Amino acid sequence: MKVASSHLSYCTNIHPAETWAQTAAVLQSHVLAVRDRLRASGTLGPAEPFAIGLRLSAVAATELLEGNQLAELRDWLEDNQTYVFTINGFPYGSFHGTRVKEQVFMPDWTDRARLEYTKDLFKILAVIASPDAGASVSTLPGSHKSFERDESRILGHLIELASWLDELAAATGLDFHLGLEPEPLGHFENTTETLAFFARLQAASPDPEMTRRRIGVNYDACHFALEYDVAHDALEALTGAQIRISKIHLSSALALDPRDPSALAAIRGFDEPVYFHQVLLRTPAAEVLRFIDLPAFFAAVDLREIDPAGFEEMRVHFHIPLDSEPEPPLRSTLNQTQAVLDWRRDHLDACQHYEIETYTWGVLPPGMQRPIEEQIAGEYLWVLANT
């Protein structure tokens, strides 16, 4: 849906779907149900197009490009007053019901399979995206720190993609752009590391202006809050360095006071085996200690390798619905999501793609779960009320 000059969607990665047939079923059921809820509430006009933030696995993307299915999707979008302006290309393979954890970073940008998958996503957008909305794909921040990859291969593949996108843009008239999504323990994860990575990318590119047009940042409000980066300052630094804000994920993380034993006990209920839940603790001196996942943090506490009482704040990578705060003593980083929307009001031209991305519905503790369409519609209402 349009919000002033911007486009707002929710990411369909919240729905389990790995094949194109499963994804199409999601569009016909859950997505249209959310659209109809927003229309019934008066939030979306009866003739207003509804935007879809599509998630396609590599399998689904390959299947969609076969035969006449892409043309059929284009017709379905038009018939149902819907449109796609962005695709989440971070998870290459399975994203629900199995151990995702480190697998979500594989293949990374050192692997040509990641490059070809991303090209497939843009080929799809070249057919179904509309010129007035542009077309973005979000992806991982190159790799994961624990993989210790050769950055030159990452840069080479990104520069190759940028050149390919520039040619595709010239042929279609669409504004294509890729958003690299910093994440805790990613190849680059915070504002400082992102600025440094993009400086190296520009230095390696034979055409830095072309690379700036086509390769930018997918700013995830949850991820930058986890890093204790203030939203206004981070966004000002990125745009000041002429880094394109390709897309903004509106999302929120868990937060707590690690000196409170009841808060530490409560956070154990969010330890589940599917997704990475990185832990970042901050000392009173603003030093940050990172753990790759909740089990690693709890192991360090149980073995008395760290004393939580020595930290003033703890944040956990677990996306929390924007309109639903966890019960005390837990809280969220929603204030940083609000700060992103505050910044947007003064920078309407800085980014046109916004996406609600609370993919954790299936692993939320029982007390926080609602019918899925109700949750998604509630998050839309929160965003619109705070925009």
Image (cartoon, grey):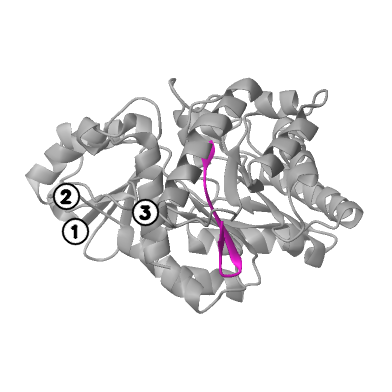
Mark 1 = which residue? 312
Q: Residue drawn at (69%, 40%), measured in percent from left and top? A: 79
Q: In which quarter of the image is residue 232?
A: bottom left
**Neighbour tally class for label 1: few under 14, some 14-19, many 20 plus, Cα within 10 Å:** some
Q: Is residue 199 left or right of residue 191?
A: right
- Is tag 3's residue or tag 1's residue first in the polypeptide sequence? 3
Q: What residue type is labelled 2?
A: Pro
Q: In which quarter of the image is residue 374?
A: top left
Based on the picture, tell me whether residue 7 belongs to the magenta stretch. Answer: yes
Residues at marks 3 and 2 touching, judged by CB atoms closer than 8 Å: no
Label 3 and label 1: CA atoms lie apart by 14 Å
User: In the picture, which quadrant includes the N terminus?
Assistant: bottom right
Indicate the position of residue 324 as horizontal and vertical percent values. 27, 49
Q: Nearer the viewer, mark 3 or mark 1?
A: 3
Mark 2 = which residue? 258
Residue lying at the far right of the rendered structure: 171
Indicate the position of residue 176 as horizontal and vertical percent values. 75, 54
Indicate the position of residue 373 as horizontal and vertical percent values. 40, 38
Indicate the position of residue 163 as horizontal and vertical percent values. 84, 52
Label 1 and label 2: CA atoms lie apart by 7 Å
Q: Is residue 268 left or right of residue 49?
A: left
Q: Residue drawn at (20%, 43%), measured in percent from left and top? A: 306
Q: Give the range drawn in magenta.
A: 1-12
Q: What element carries label 2?
A: loop
Mark 3 = which residue? 226
Q: In this view, does 126 lie above or below 367?
A: below
